Amino acid sequence: MREYKLIIPGLLPGLNEYSTLERRNRYEAATMKRQAECVVMAEARRQLRSLRITNPVAMDYHWIERNRKRDKDNIAFAKKFIQDALVKVGVLKNDGWKEIKGFCDDFAVDKEKPRIEVEIQEVI
């Protein structure tokens, strides 16, 4: 099994932030999603370079927050941005049922260095 790791520094918007914008103005919500995806795509290009995965994958998300203020389900919503971005840069072929076999979420706190660590394992 081949495994790859992507580290996204900082935090991505959660479900609450996205939903608030979506209710107020769907174009602002689309802009937020696009900006979050751009952050992920830049890191994927830098860290994973020209990686192209054609096999199905399992993904482990390690959400490392600044504090415990946001609910875990709110935080983990950002996997939508991450998976869509990985498809856009070509790391993943798609993010459907055939390509993503499953995912796990783990949560921690690091006041100094919040980040998201994504482990991608090819399921062969």
Image (cartoon, grey):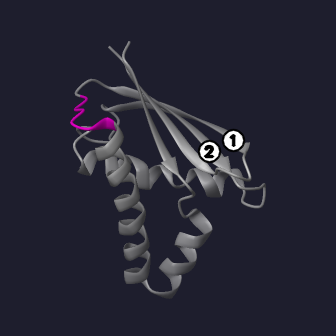
Quadrant of the image containing the N terminus: top left
Location of mark 1 (residue): 107
The magenta span reads: 48-53
Q: Is residue 30 above or below residue 108?
A: below
Q: Is residue 55 magenta?
A: no
Q: Is residue 84 left or right of residue 52?
A: right
- In the image, 25 versus 90, the foreground residue is 90
Q: Are marks 2 and 1 in contact (CB under 8 Å)?
A: yes
Q: Which quarter of the figure has residue 99?
A: top left
Magenta stretch: helix, strand or loop mostly = loop
Q: Is residue 100 left or right of residue 90?
A: right
Q: Residue at x 57, y 58 (%)?
A: 11
Q: Residue at x 48, y 48 (%)?
A: 8
Q: Is residue 102 left or right of residue 93?
A: right
Q: Amino acid at mark 1?
A: Phe
Location of mark 2 (residue): 63
Quadrant of the image containing the C terminus: top left
Q: Residues within 10 Å of mark 2 (few under 14, many from 20)?
A: many
Q: Is residue 93 left or right of residue 112?
A: left
